[in-house]
Amino acid sequence: MVFSASRIEQPIHRIGSSVAVLSSDELRERGVEFVADALLEVPSLIVSSQGPRGSMTQVRVRGNEANHALILIDGMRVSNASTGEYDLANMNLESVEKIEVLLGPQSTLYGSDAIAGVISITTRKGHEGFEGLVRVGIGSQKTRSGSAQIRGGQQGWHYSLTTSKYLTDGISAASEANGNFEKDDYQSKSLNIKAGYDQDSFQTWLVFNQTDSRYDFDSDDFVSGLAVDEESNRQWGNTRSLALVMAVPLFDGRMTNQLQLSKIENDLELYTVFFGSGSTYETKTDRNAIEYQGSFKLNEANSLQFGAERFEEDLLATSYSVFNRSVEQKGAYLQWLTAVGDLDLSLGSRWDKHDTFGTQNTYRLTASYPVNDRFRLRASHSTGFKAPSLQ
């Protein structure tokens, strides 16, 4: 079942858009540790980094820019408001349940950040009983990693807690052939908490994520532009996200209603040395969001999905001067899913308003039809737009 394509659960064969689903259990069995490495397995995605482990890691969908792909963690927009991107360098698979990758413009359901596609990451949820897991790993370049996880639930309550740490001496981004031997070390630690209460008439859950990281990086030679060793260059990052979700089904389950309140904070500090002089650059970004999404089943062949959202973004950047900026966005959408025999269709439209760049309207149409037991035709046509980031 896939959720991201229509904002309701659907069998993957009934979806007109191109979508891929990655199971974290299967990935871990093959030795994949990080989300960025997992995404390398999806066609049409390009994952790139600016150096060794810990350096800025971006994902591009079908050749678009990195800030054209919306990344969600448990439904929360986690991109940095400063750049519109999410750095995947620090996210491991320890707390991840599955990853859905939705290709093509998805602005109709998700707004301006989804002009190229959506990467939706779902973290693990507790279940009845109790389960604990501990992992320890070592590797080359003095790499050490460890994680601990507990999950459980009783009488409708559920909880999951995962903590992990990763350290490595790393390698140098600068070539040893040019006399560069200083390694770029990296370390990160993360915490994921997910807890809630489920009943047929009401569900609520709370999600908290925090990641702290430190990464040493090299400089560029002023003349040649090549990377050269610099022991003092350093980057610190801190990301915190918190979401409260409440869901209430009505009319014997024919209508679903979900309200999500979320807050995301991204802090970044860079210390760089240039011609022997050090300087510090800091950014602090906040995103506060409220989102409602609902669906109504008209009959066995037809259903409506609808929703509205509003979020505020704030940026404070400090270097030789101070830059402060805020923006507000809001939007609403409506989608119709229908089945005509074996043909599955969707038609959706969205209205967005950006307090700086005005109003935008987008739409999406998709179709899925089985030719036989082995082949299925999919088609989609959609529009999208991208509002500039705060910096």
Image: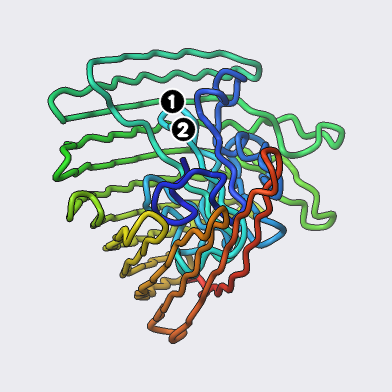
The percent position of residue 193, horizontal first and vertical second, equals: 28, 34
Closer to the camera, 222 or 100? 100
The residue carrying mark 2 is 188
Q: Circles 1 and 2: CB distance less than 8 Å?
A: yes
**Label placed on residue 165:** 1
Is 236 left, or right, of 298 in this rendering?
right
Q: Which amino acid does label 1 sit on?
A: Lys
Q: Which amino acid does label 2 sit on?
A: Ser
Which of the two discs, 1 and 2, labels the residue nearer the N terminus? 1
Looking at the picture, how far across and down is residue 201, in whole percent? 14, 44
* Image point (76%, 46%), residue name: 227
Disc 2 secondary structure class:
strand
Whether residue 60 can be seen here: yes
Q: Which residue is drawn at 52% across and 74% down?
A: 363
Residue displayed at 32% across by 66% down: 307
Identify the image quadrant of residue 230: top right
Taking 182 as reference, is 154 above or below it?
Answer: above
Crowdedness of circle 1 by 10 Å Cα count: few (<14), some, many (20+)? Answer: some
